[in-house]
Structures are given as structure tokens and as C-alpha cells.
Amino acid sequence: MTHATISHPHATPTWQGITTLKFAWWLFLASEVMFFAGLIAAYIVLRAGSPVWPIVSEVLNVPLVAGNTFILIVSSVTMVQAYAGIQAGNQSQLRNMLLATTALGIIFLGIQAFEWSALLREGETAQSSLFGATFYTLTGFHGLHVTGGVVGLIFVTLKAFRTGYTQAEHGGIELMGLYWHFVDVVWIILFTIVYLI
Amino acid sequence: MAHPPAAHRAPYMRVFVFLVVLTVLEVLLAFVLAASPAKVPMLIALAIAKATLVAMYYMHLRFEGRVLRVIAVFPLILSIVLALAPSFDVLARR
């Protein structure tokens, strides 16, 4: 049996070669997968069982959201470049890439807010139809996760500007990156299921 | 904190190009194959390919040990079960 080990009073405990914090973070992400799986399963059942469903491309602004998807993909690249930067001990790359990721996250949310406001003006609300209820629930919960990610990014960016991360110790950047990429993965699935199918 | 040893060699920009190309392909297929029965399986396959690229290279699962891979894959299997199981109910109602 393998036990968590602490070799030094200030060392990060590890288990199976993984820090316990990173292990716990992956368990958290696994629970998040199940959260979104429940929502997506509900969407599939409601949509498949509904006698009426709009032609999605006529209701939703697919080109706009495809552009927003591109923005989120770019933000994943900048996030991973921030991580690569601090792994190489490059503080300026870390800071610039974190700033870029934060800005792209805010732009994503801005475009989503614009999309929502346009839909609401057209009378498509969460109460107006089953389509509206599922659309706002799925994209809303994802947007909430992006918002949480942006708040986290602001914190780690501020810490990075105080030289809070080093080449040897940058666990916070890795965990932030894992969360941000998870949010990207969820959007990749949602974009296909909600906007393209 | 322990980091995946080979993560710094990951082809981040190449993966980015793949993701962009697959996204463009997805959007084009959604319109070109609008009425085709092949549309849904093809779009789902492309989405799974994109999600896998992000998980393997940006989340570094390709470079991690078995424990984290199991933690990552197990909920995906449960998710597929969760998504498919209610479909029998939908089919029964038709």
C-alpha cells in the first residue's frame, strides 16, 4: 500500500508521484465532468423527446459563436504557453500569456453576453420554450465556469506580477491551466451539441 | 509540485493548428451536411477528437501516469452511460 509522504515539513505531500493537491484537483475536475454530463444527458433526452425543436442555425448566431470558440481555443494556447514559460523560468512569458488568457476569457464572456442579449431581444427566453430553457441552462452554467476561471486567472496573474511563481514552484499555474483547459473541453462539446447538431 | 517530465516538449502550436482546422471543418460540415444522416456522427467524432487533443496535450494527460488517466477516463465512461441510458426511455415513448 502506498502512503502519502512528507519528506520535509514544508514539502508538498505526494502520492503515486503526484502532489495530493493535483490529485484532488483531478478528482474535482472528474466531478465537474459528471456535472456537465448530467446537463448534456438532460439536453439530449429533452431534445430527442420533444415534438418541436427549432432549426438551430436559424435561431442561433453560429458564425459569431464559432468565432467565440476560436477565442477560447486561443486562450487555451496562451494558458499552456504561460505554463511552458514558467517551466523554462521565463517570468515575462508567464505574465504576458496570463494577461492574454485573462483578456481572452473576458472577451469570450462579452461575446456570450452580446449573444444572449440579442436572443432575449428577439423574445427567446428561458421560459419561452424548451429549447430556450436548455440553451440558457447549458451555456449559462458554462459561462459561470468561465467567469470562475477568469476570477482565478486574475488572482494568479496578480501573483505572477509579484513574482509569486518560480521555475521550481508553480503548482498554481498548473492547476489554473488544468481548470481552464477543462472549461475549453466542455465548450468544444457544447458548441457541437447545442450549435451545430 | 511534480510536473509531467516531457510536458515541455509537447507540440502546443501544432495542436492549436489542428484544433482550428477541425473547428472550421465542423462548422462547414454542419452546413454542408445539414440534411445528411452522417452529420451527427461526423460532428460528434470531430468534437471528441478536439476534446482529446486538448486533454492529451494541453492538460498533459499524454505525459501523466496511469492514476490520473484513470481519474480522467472513468467519468467519461459514466458520462456516455448517463447520456445513452435515458435514450431507451425516449425511444419507448415514440
Image: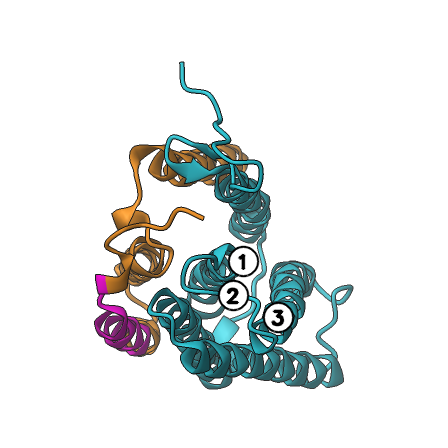
N-term-proximal mark, 2 vs 3: 3
| Figure quadrant of the C terminus of chain A | bottom left
Q: Which residue lies furthest to the top in this view?
A: A1
N-term-proximal mark, 2 vs 1: 2
| Residue A159: mark | 3
Judge left or right: residue A119 versus residue A16.
right
Q: Which residue is drawn at 29% across and 59% down?
A: B57
Per the rendered image, the range of residues in magenta is B9-25
Q: How far apart are marks 2 and 3 (CA)?
A: 7 Å
Q: Distance between the residues labelled 1 and 3?
A: 10 Å
Q: Is B17 in the magenta?
A: yes
Colour chain B is painted in: orange
Q: Quadrant of residue B71?
A: top left
Determine which residue is flagged by label 1. A172
| Figure quadrant of the N terminus of chain A | top left
- Looking at the rendered image, the disc whose residue lies closer to the viewer, 2 or 1, is 2
Mark 2 secondary-structure assignment: loop
